[in-house]
């Protein structure tokens, strides 16, 4: 398959905002995708080379890309950089450089998808001495044969800045339509394996029947089961039918652990592979988990003085660290609190009721200093549950989780089988959708961020406030660097930003307000932290804002 065909798809996807049309384009494309490319095409369409849970990264920045293009075209790096200043888009500037190309290889061959993909894999896998140089040469080699438009899309794939508006939902529907299978079965298979390539293949080769037989697999992360909110433990108990398992809600980072013999892989909440950053936890897991093969889930917490939990950002700092890990192991010791098990020695447990899963978890794990089982209380007594909740807060935890004893594990679902109870007026995780250039000393910095909640029904992000305080100068510089490539439109001082970055925001009150389309506005919002562990779709929803507003009003009435 020629790469030009894929480039043509990207171009058509960019030209329309209609979801139905995008789905059709992708479906048509999948239909004509040859079998040997079916595993990779879905990811390329999403603008990625690998699924998020694959550890491999391209490790190529703008500078290296420009070098590669310069080498392939004879157009100087300087000229390409200058052009970026005009176009504001490296992809476009690379296309321009390819048009101007001073030397064209005599043996030039049209690019195939396979060649581009294989090259990008080689780029990702190049490591060690002079790897930057090798990466550059691999890339130059394909740019040598790339048409301008192809070059643009290769650049965007490399930098992870493809803007075709194809998200997981479109891909799911397109796979269903291309291979004439049920979308809910595609969704199910994806929730169990997080692998669109595999799901597309099963859909094509085995249809509905094959999809319905898809099982969880070691080495492919399961989408995590999520929780809804309850106002208090009493409400949670009623919701659960009078009896429930209450567990401490640890404030850390959720992880999913896959153990296969001596090998352990740890995925973050966003299902990114974080194994390498936490070798201390990995070896503790190997010692604690008694089965040969298992998938378990838990909350990774940073522990401070007297075993008290530290804010979850500490755990994220551990995840980010790629070098001098030993130093971090000492500075930020971690503890894993396991709360679920989905697979033991060949047997999937997701259909097993929670009560039994918990028993299996207790039988599976030898607790140690680093590996614990979540503290739990099974009760039908509201007072007992309330005491447990208060104790949890006293110990510095976030609150409690209530779980239905007879509930199965529902991958990717935010249902009522799990409820979280936390003190109200909690912070909100919101998505940055706009910003303003500062004034005076801060003229080169983006500040005053327009933040939005997610509306799962429309898939849109609805603004609820502007956050201008709580940032240090370093924060602003960092955000400006992060947000600049995401600018969609500029109007005077105001810029519109592609919804990608999630921040945690605290505030004094939620007000009813006609100012924003949501009908709500945050009073005195203040920046707390960057939530790198959340994707925009995982930000707090507009329903959550409405619910918090109600809690707040109820609470006011009580006082
Ligand atoms: N005992 C526990 N059982 C389940 N989840 C727990 C437990 N302790 C801590 N957690 C964390 O609480 C989260 C449950 O809330 P939810 O499903 O709404 O996730 P979330 O969107 O990340 O919410 P939050 O921002 O409140 O952590 C889990 O994702 C997990 O990270």
Image (cartoon, helix red, strand yellow):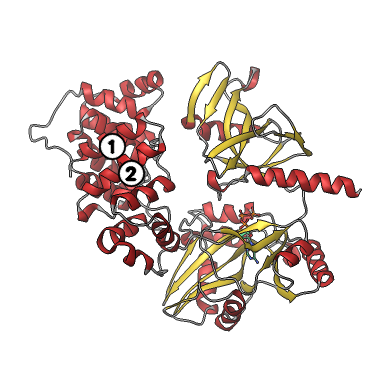
- SS for tag 2? helix
Which residue lies at the image location 75% right of the left edge and 66% below the top edge?
A: 238
Residue 550 spot, x, y in % from top left: 77, 45
Asked if the residue under mark 2 is in contact with the one under mark 1, i.e. CB atoms within 8 Å, the reply is: yes
- Label 1: few (<14), some or many (≥20) within 10 Å? some
Instruction: Looking at the picture, tell me which residue is in the foreground, 354 or 477.
Output: 354
389 w.r.t. 19: above or below: below
Residue that lies at the very extreme toward the left in this rendered image:
106
Residue 403 spot, x, y in % from top left: 66, 68
184 w.r.t. 217: above or below: above
Residue with the mark numbered 1: 9
From the Cβ of disc 1, is ligand 1 less than 8 Å away? no
Q: Residue 45 — which label?
A: 2
Which residue lies at the image location 62% right of the left edge and 30% below the top edge?
A: 450
- SS for tag 1? helix
Q: Which image quadrant for residue 10? A: top left
Instruction: Looking at the picture, tell me which residue is in the foreground, 532 or 205.
Output: 205
State the quadrant of the N terminus: top left
């Amino acid at each position: 398959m020629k790469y030009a065909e894929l480039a043509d798809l990207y171009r058509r996807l960019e030209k329309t905002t209609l979801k139905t049309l995008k789905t059709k384009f992708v479906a048509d494309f999948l239909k004509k995708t040859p079998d040997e490319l079916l595993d990779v095409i879905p990811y390329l369409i999403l603008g990625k080379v690998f699924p998020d849970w694959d550890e491999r990264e391209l490790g190529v920045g703008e500078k290296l890309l420009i070098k590669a293009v310069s080498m392939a075209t004879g157009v100087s790096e300087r000229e390409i950089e200058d052009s970026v200043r005009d176009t504001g888009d490296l992809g476009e500037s690379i296309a321009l450089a390819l048009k101007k190309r001073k030397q064209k290889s005599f043996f030039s061959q049209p690019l195939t998808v396979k060649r581009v993909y294989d090259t990008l894999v080689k780029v990702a896998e190049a490591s060690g001495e002079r790897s930057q140089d090798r990466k550059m040469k691999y890339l130059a080699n394909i740019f040598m044969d790339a048409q301008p438009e192809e070059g643009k899309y290769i650049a965007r794939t490399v930098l992870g800045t493809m803007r075709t508006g194809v998200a997981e939902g479109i891909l799911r529907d397109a796979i269903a339509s291309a291979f004439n299978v049920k979308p809910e079965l595609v969704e199910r298979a994806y929730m169990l394996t997080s692998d669109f390539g595999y799901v597309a293949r099963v859909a094509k080769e085995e249809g509905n029947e094959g999809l319905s037989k898809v099982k969880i697999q070691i080495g492919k992360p399961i989408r995590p089961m999520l929780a809804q909110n309850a106002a208090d433990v009493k409400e949670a108990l009623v919701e659960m039918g009078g009896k429930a398992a209450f567990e401490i809600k640890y404030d850390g980072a959720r992880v999913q652990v896959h153990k296969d013999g001596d090998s352990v892989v740890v995925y973050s909440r966003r299902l990114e592979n974080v194994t390498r950053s936490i070798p201390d936890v990995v070896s503790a897991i190997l010692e604690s988990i008694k089965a040969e093969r298992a998938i378990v889930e838990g909350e990774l917490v940073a522990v401070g003085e007297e075993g008290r939990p530290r804010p979850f950002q500490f755990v994220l700092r551990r995840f980010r660290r790629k070098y001098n890990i030993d130093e971090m192991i000492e500075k930020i010791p971690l503890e894993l609190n396991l709360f679920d098990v989905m697979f033991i020695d060949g047997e999937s447990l997701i259909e097993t009721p929670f009560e039994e899963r918990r028993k299996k978890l207790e039988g599976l794990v030898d607790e140690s200093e680093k590996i614990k089982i979540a503290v739990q209380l099974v009760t039908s007594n509201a007072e007992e549950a309330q005491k447990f909740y208060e104790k949890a807060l006293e110990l510095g935890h976030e609150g409690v989780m209530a779980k239905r004893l007879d509930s199965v594990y529902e991958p990717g679902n935010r249902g009522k089988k799990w409820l979280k109870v936390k003190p109200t007026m909690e912070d909100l995780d919101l998505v940055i959708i706009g910003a303003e250039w500062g004034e005076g000393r801060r003229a080169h910095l983006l500040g005053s961020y327009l933040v939005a909640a997610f509306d799962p029904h429309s898939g849109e992000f609805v603004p609820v406030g502007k956050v201008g305080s709580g940032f240090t100068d370093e924060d602003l510089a960092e955000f400006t660097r992060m947000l600049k490539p995401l600018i969609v439109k500029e109007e005077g001082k105001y810029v519109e930003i592609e919804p990608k970055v999630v921040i945690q925001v605290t505030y004094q009150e939620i007000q009813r307000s006609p100012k924003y389309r949501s009908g709500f506005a945050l009073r005195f919002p203040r920046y707390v932290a960057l939530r790198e562990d959340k994707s925009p779709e995982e930000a707090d929803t507009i329903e959550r804002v409405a619910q918090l507003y109600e809690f707040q009003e109820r609470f006011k009435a009580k006082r």
